[in-house]
C-alpha cells in the first residue's frame, strides 16, 4: 500500500519504512525557537548533559514575540538567549528581522520533504512548502537541539480535496477559517492534514502559508501541501540546497477524505472566543471595532499588505479606531516601502509596527482595553489572547480588516472592490 | 500509586492561554509565581481555592492552542495531582509527559464539579466516591510510561542515552 506525505517523510528520516500508528525516532533537519520560550528551552538543554548543539548550523532562535522588549523581565529572558547563542555559535534572527514563521522559510531554511520542529504551535505553517513541520514544547525542542533527533508517533492523515475557484474578495484566510469551521478545533487532533486540489495549486506561497498556519487550529500535527513549480520558483532565490519533493502516493491510506467546493465561499469571520466559531460575514451586523491588526504569522506577508493597501488607498481609518500593521519580516517591510504600500497605510492613519508578532502574543504593540473589539488577521481569538481577557477578538482576512478600518464596523470587503 | 482529591470541572477546548495567559510569560521561569495565575480567566483565584492533590477535569481537546510548556508546568507547580479529559491537544500532551504531569484520557461526562475522586494509576481505574461509580481509563502506552516512570524525559534520556523504541 502507498504512503501519505507524513509517512514518507518520517520513513526517510527514521531509516525505516513506517506507517500510521508506529513510533519512530527521526532525524530532525532544522529546529527553531523564539524569545518567548527560549529561556525555558535553554534551561532544559543544560540539564540534558550534552554541552554542544547537535546541529549548530540548523538551529536558530528568532526574536519576534515580545520585541522590542516591553519591560525588564522580557529583556532578562532575551539576554539568556543571546548569551546561549554566543556560547554555542548559534545563529539568531534578532529583533526587527521578523516573525519566525515568515523568516524561517524566507531565509531558505525550509525545504520540501524536510523535517522541522519549532517551539511554537504555528510551526505547522512550513507544510506550505511540502515540509513536515510541527510545533513542540520547550523540552522537546531542547532534546532536538541536543541530540538532533526526536520521537514521533506517525499520525494518520486527513486528506482535503478542494475544488472550485475563490470568488472575488475571498482569500486564503477565508478558506482557512472555513476549513477550521468544517473540521472544528479538534477535528484533526493527533492527525496530519494534506491539502490538495486546483484551488490550492492556484494559491500563492503566501496564501499556502496562511492556510497551513491554521492547521494547528484544528489540532493537526502538521498541514502539508505538495511542492510544485510555484514552490520551486519561490525557493529558487532563497536557497541553493538540493531537495526532492515528497508527494502522496495515489493509493495512500487516509483516515478521512473530505471534499470542499469553495466556489460560493464568502468572506468569513471567527467570533470570540473560539477559532472554530466561524460565520459568513454576511451574518455579522453592526459590530464596532476599536482596533485592528493587519499582520501576524498568518497574514503579514506582501500579498496580504497589497490586498489591504488596495482597499485603503485614498481612504482614511475611521476616527478613534486604531489600525496596527506588523509586516511579517524586514524584507517584506522593505518591499512594502518600495511598492508604496506603507505610504498608503500611513496616509490612511495606520500605525506601522516593527516586523514582529505585535499584539497577537498579548504582551505589547496594542493591547485592547476592557470591552473593546479587536479585528485581527491573526489565527487565534481566545479570551485574553490579545492581553486583556475583558476584550473581544474577531478574526478575518486582510481585506476585511482594511474595509472595517475605514467604516469602524466589521465590514464585507466586497463592498470596496 | 493511589491519588485522592477533589474534581474541579471545566468544559471543552480549554486552551493554553486559559491555563496560563501569555501576558505573564515575562515572569520567565518562576513557575511558583506563574502558577498563581493558573486558570484565572475561567476560575478567578483558582490556585488559592485548590488543595494539593486536587484534580482538573475537562471535556475534549484540553490544552489546545499555543505550544507553551508553561501550561503543564504551572499545573504541576500549583499542586494538581492529575488532569482527566476526554482528549488532549497533542503538543500539550507531549509537554505534560515531559513535565511529569499525569494526563489521563477518559470519559469525564459522569464527573461533577466538587466530586471526590480516588485514582489507582497501576490498575487504571478512577473511583468517583461522591457518586460511587468506577470509571476505567485508557492505559498509557508503554513507551510513554517508561518516560513517566523515569521521572520525565530529561531523566529518561540521561539514564538511557537515547530513545529506546521497541
Image (spheres, coloured by chain):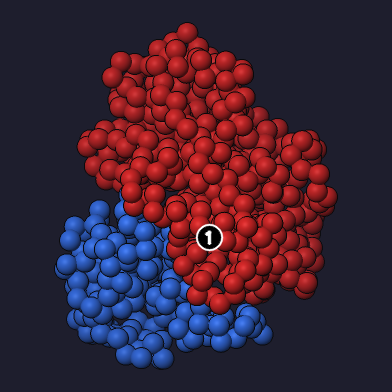
Chain colours: A red, B blue
Quarter holding residue B136: bottom left
Image height check: is B130 above or below B87?
below
The residue nearer to you, when weighing B152 against A42, is A42
Image height check: is A365 above or below A340?
below
Image height check: is B159 above or below A207?
below
Quarter holding residue A408: top left
Q: Badge 1 local density, few (<14 within 10 Å), some, or many (20+)?
A: some
Where is residue A399? Give x, y as percent. 50, 24
Quarter holding residue A269: top left
Which type of secondary structure does the marked residue at label 1 adopt? helix
User: Which residue is located at x 61 percent, y 31 percent?
Assistant: A331
Is residue A341 visible from the viewing direction of this image? yes
Where is residue B72? Give x, y as percent. 38, 67
Instruction: Please state, as top left, top right, bottom left or bottom right, where the N terminus of chain A lies in the image.
Output: bottom right
User: Which residue is located at x 57 percent, y 35 percent?
Assistant: A329
Number of numbered discs on residues: 1
User: Which residue is located at x 28 percent, y 19 percent?
Assistant: A320
The residue nearer to you, when weighing A205 against A179, is A205
Where is residue B1? Give x, y as percent. 36, 91
User: Which residue is located at x 33 percent, y 73 percent?
Assistant: B76
Chain ID for label 1?
A
Where is residue A12? Give x, y as percent. 77, 65
Q: Which residue is mark 1?
A: A84
Is residue B61 visible from the viewing direction of this image? no
Q: In the image, is A249 to the left or to the right of A89?
A: right
Q: Residue furthest top?
A: A314
Image height check: is B29 above or below A326?
below
The residue nearer to you, when weighing B98 against A24, is B98
The residue nearer to you, when weighing A281 against B38, is B38
Q: In the image, is A215 to the left or to the right of A360?
A: right
Amino acid at each position: 500500500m502507498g504512503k501519505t506525505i507524513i509517512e514518507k517523510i518520517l520513513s526517510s528520516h527514521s531509516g525505516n519504512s513506517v506507517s500510521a500508528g508506529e513510533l519512530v525516532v527521526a532525524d530532525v533537519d532544522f529546529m527553531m525557537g523564539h524569545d518567548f520560550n527560549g529561556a525555558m528551552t535553554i534551561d532544559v538543554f543544560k540539564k540534558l548533559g550534552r554541552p554542544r548543539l547537535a546541529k549548530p548550523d540548523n538551529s536558530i532562535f528568532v526574536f519576534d514575540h515580545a520585541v522590542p522588549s516591553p519591560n525588564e523581565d522580557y529583556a532578562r529572558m532575551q539576554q539568556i538567549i543571546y548569551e546561549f547563542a554566543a556560547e554555542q555559535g548559534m545563529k539568531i534572527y534578532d529583533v526587527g528581522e521578523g516573525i519566525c514563521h515568515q523568516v524561517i522559510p524566507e531565509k531558505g531554511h525550509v525545504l520540501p520533504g524536510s523535517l522541522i520542529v519549532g517551539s511554537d504551535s504555528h510551526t505547522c505553517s512550513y507544510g506550505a512548502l511540502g515540509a513536515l513541520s510541527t510545533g513542540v514544547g520547550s523540552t522537546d525542542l531542547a532534546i532536538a537541539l541536543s541530540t538532533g533527533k526526536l520521537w514521533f508517533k506517525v499520525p494518520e492523515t486527513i486528506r482535503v480535496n478542494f475544488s472550485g475557484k475563490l470568488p472575488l474578495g475571498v482569500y486564503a484566510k477565508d478558506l482557512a477559517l472555513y476549513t477550521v469551521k468544517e473540521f472544528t478545533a479538534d477535528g484533526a487532533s493527533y492527525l496530519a492534514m494534506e491539502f490538495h486540489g486546483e484551488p490550492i495549486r492556484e494559491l500563492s506561497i503566501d496564501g499556502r502559508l496562511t492556510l497551513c498556519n491554521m492547521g494547528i487550529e484544528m489540532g493537526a500535527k502538521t498541514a502539508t501541501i505538495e511542492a510544485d513549480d510555484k514552490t520551486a520558483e519561490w525557493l529558487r532565490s532563497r536557497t541553493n540546497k538540493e531537495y526532492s519533493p515528497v508527494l502522496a502516493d495515489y493509493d495512500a491510506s487516509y483516515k478521512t477524505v473530505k471534499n470542499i467546493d469553495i466556489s460560493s465561499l464568502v468572506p468569513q469571520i471567527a467570533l470570540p472566543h473560539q477559532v472554530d466559531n466561524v460565520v459568513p460575514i454576511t451574518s455579522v451586523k453592526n459590530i464596532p471595532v476599536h482596533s485592528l491588526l493587519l499582520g501576524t504569522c498568518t497574514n503579514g506577508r506582501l500579498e496580504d499588505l497589497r490586498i489591504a493597501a488596495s482597499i485603503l488607498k485614498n481612504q482614511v481609518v475611521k476616527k478613534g479606531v486604531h489600525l496596527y500593521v506588523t509586516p511579517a519580516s524586514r524584507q517584506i517591510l522593505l518591499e512594502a516601502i518600495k511598492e508604496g504600500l506603507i505610504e498608503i497605510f500611513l496616509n490612511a492613519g495606520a500605525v506601522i509596527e516593527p516586523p514582529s508578532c505585535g499584539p497577537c502574543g498579548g504582551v505589547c504593540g496594542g493591547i485592547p482595553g476592557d470591552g473593546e473589539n479587536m479585528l485581527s488577521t491573526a489565527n487565534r481569538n481566545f479570551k485574553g489572547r490579545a492581553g486583556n481577557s475583558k476584550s473581544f477578538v474577531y478574526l478575518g482576512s486582510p481585506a476585511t480588516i482594511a474595509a472595517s478600518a475605514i467604516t469602524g464596523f466589521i465590514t464585507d470587503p466586497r463592498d470596496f472592490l | 500509586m493511589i491519588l485522592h482529591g477533589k474534581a474541579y470541572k471545566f468544559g471543552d477546548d480549554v486552551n493554553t492561554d486559559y491555563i496560563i495567559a501569555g501576558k505573564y510569560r515575562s515572569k520567565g521561569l518562576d513557575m511558583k509565581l506563574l502558577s498563581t495565575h493558573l486558570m484565572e480567566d475561567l476560575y478567578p483565584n483558582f490556585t488559592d481555592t485548590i488543595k494539593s492533590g486536587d484534580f482538573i477535569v475537562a471535556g475534549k481537546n484540553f490544552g489546545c492552542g499555543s505550544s507553551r510548556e508553561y501550561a503543564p508546568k504551572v499545573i504541576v507547580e500549583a499542586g494538581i495531582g492529575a488532569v482527566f479529559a476526554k482528549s488532549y491537544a497533542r503538543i500539550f500532551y507531549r509537554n505534560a509527559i515531559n513535565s511529569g504531569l499525569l494526563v489521563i484520557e477518559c470519559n469525564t461526562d459522569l464527573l461533577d464539579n466538587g466530586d471526590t475522586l480516588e485514582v489507582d494509576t497501576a490498575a487504571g481505574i478512577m473511583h468517583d466516591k461522591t457518586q460511587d461509580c468506577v470509571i476505567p481509563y485508557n492505559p498509557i502506552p508503554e513507551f510513554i510510561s517508561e518516560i513517566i516512570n523515569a521521572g520525565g524525559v530529561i531523566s529518561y534520556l540521561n539514564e538511557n542515552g537515547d530513545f529506546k523504541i521497541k
